């Protein structure tokens, strides 16, 4: 089992750092799944018990100048590691102006991802900053927990308003309530609502547009749905706020799929990165 990779391009390094920073804001620990073509950051929360789930996919060729992987076996050519994203983020922070960053799976006192950043210097002597980040190797028998989640059979899919605008609204609402209702329809309308004994607040967004899904453009259960009819889900406002606070990916597309009274499925797309985040409903 071997893994080594190298980033030389500063733009790729900054982009990778932003992705890792985003992940670190969403979860304290997650699974880093390494395959020959992709890297995945996976959080497999049990929706039934109220946990969020996350799936972030990166194409390795768009980030790394060198990338070598030998998985646990020829027929299972991948590696799964439990990592603390904040530790990865810290290591990358010290490497912002590096000439190159090498990442390698090593065995110290425990398995580690070793980050070695070669920093610029005025003399001929090179300066290398090394971080050994402890990781846990996930045995193959547990891999089935970390496969890509299927897109739920949603009632409504809608493009999100600018994430910064949405974050400002949710931040204000959080001061008033712990729960928020997201509702949307197929006319491109979305509402964020809170209701307490003392106050009721709704923010309306319109003309957002609805994404086409599938080869025929059908949308889950929604192709026969009344366009005016709202689908809604009540969620823990802190989980939505956490998702909006962490965003450094600058997505070209941001979408929300709503399964009525069950789950919201948020999707961010940016060229070579896709991030999916699932927030279950609360009663």
Image (tube, helix red, strand yellow):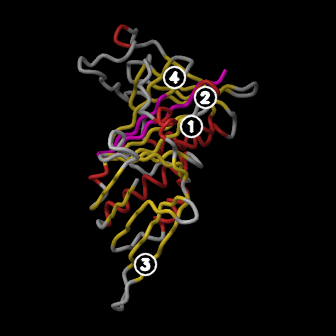
Closest to the observer: 88 or 138? 138
- Residue beneath the point at 53% across and 53% down: 85
* Among the two numbered marks 3 and 2 on one chain, the one whose residue lies closer to the N terminus: 3
How far apart, in angstroms, are the residues tagged by discs 3 and 1?
39 Å
* Among the two numbered marks 4 and 1 on one chain, the one whose residue lies closer to the N terminus: 4
How far apart, in angstroms, are the residues tagged by discs 3 and 2?
46 Å
Closest to the observer: 221 or 54? 54
Q: Say which of marks 3 and 4 sits in front.
A: 3
Disc 2, disc 4: CB below 8 Å?
no
232 vs 65: above or below: above
Q: Which mark is residue 235?
A: 2
How far apart, in angstroms, are the residues tagged by discs 3 and 4?
51 Å
Circle 4 residues within 10 Å: few <14, some 14–19, many ≥20: many
- Residue beneath the point at 57% across and 46% down: 27
The residue under label 4 is 183
Closest to the observer: 278 or 74? 74
Circle 1 residues within 10 Å: few <14, some 14–19, many ≥20: many
Q: Does the segment drawn in magenta span residue 223?
A: no
Q: Quadrant of residue 110?
A: bottom right
Circle 3 residues within 10 Å: few <14, some 14–19, many ≥20: some
The residue under label 1 is 240
Q: Which mark is residue 128?
A: 3
How far apart, in angstroms, are the residues tagged by discs 2 and 4?
11 Å
| Image coords of residue 164 (percent x, y) | 47, 45
Q: Say which of marks 2 and 4 sits in front.
A: 2
Q: In which quadrant of the rendered image does the C terminus lie?
A: top right
Disc 4, disc 1: CB below 8 Å?
no
> Which stretch appears magenta?
265-283
| Image coords of residue 278 (percent x, y) | 51, 32
Task: Describe the element under mark 2 as helix, strand or loop.
Answer: strand
Say left or right for 37 vs 205: left
């Amino acid at each position: 089992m071997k893994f080594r990779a190298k980033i030389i391009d500063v733009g790729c390094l900054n982009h990778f750092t932003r992705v890792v920073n985003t992940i670190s804001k969403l979860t304290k620990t997650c699974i880093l799944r390494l395959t020959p073509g992709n890297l995945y950051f996976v959080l497999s929360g049990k929706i039934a018990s109220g946990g969020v789930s996350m799936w972030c996919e990166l194409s390795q060729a768009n980030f790394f100048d060198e990338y070598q992987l030998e998985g646990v076996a020829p027929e299972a050519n991948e590696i799964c590691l439990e990592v603390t994203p904040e530790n990865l983020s810290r290591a990358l922070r010290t490497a912002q102006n590096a000439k190159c960053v090498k990442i390698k799976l090593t065995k110290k006192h425990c398995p580690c991802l070793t980050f070695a950043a070669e920093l610029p210097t005025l003399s001929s002597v090179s300066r290398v900053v090394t971080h050994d980040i402890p990781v846990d190797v996930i045995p193959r028998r547990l891999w089935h927990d970390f496969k890509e989640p299927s897109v739920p059979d949603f009632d409504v899919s809608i493009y999100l308003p600018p994430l910064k605008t949405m974050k400002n609204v949710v931040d204000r609402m959080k001061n008033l309530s712990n729960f928020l209702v997201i509702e949307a329809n197929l006319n491109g309308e979305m509402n964020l609502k809170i209701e307490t004994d003392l106050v009721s607040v709704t923010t309306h967004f319109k003309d957002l547009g609805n994404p086409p899904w599938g080869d025929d453009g059908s949308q889950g259960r929604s192709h026969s749905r009344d366009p005016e009819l709202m689908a809604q889900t009540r969620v823990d406002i802190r989980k939505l706020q956490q998702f909006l606070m962490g965003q450094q990916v600058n997505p070209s597309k941001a979408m929300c799929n709503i399964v009525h009274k069950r789950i919201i499925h948020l999707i961010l797309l940016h060229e070579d990165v896709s991030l999916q985040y699932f927030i279950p409903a609360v009663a």
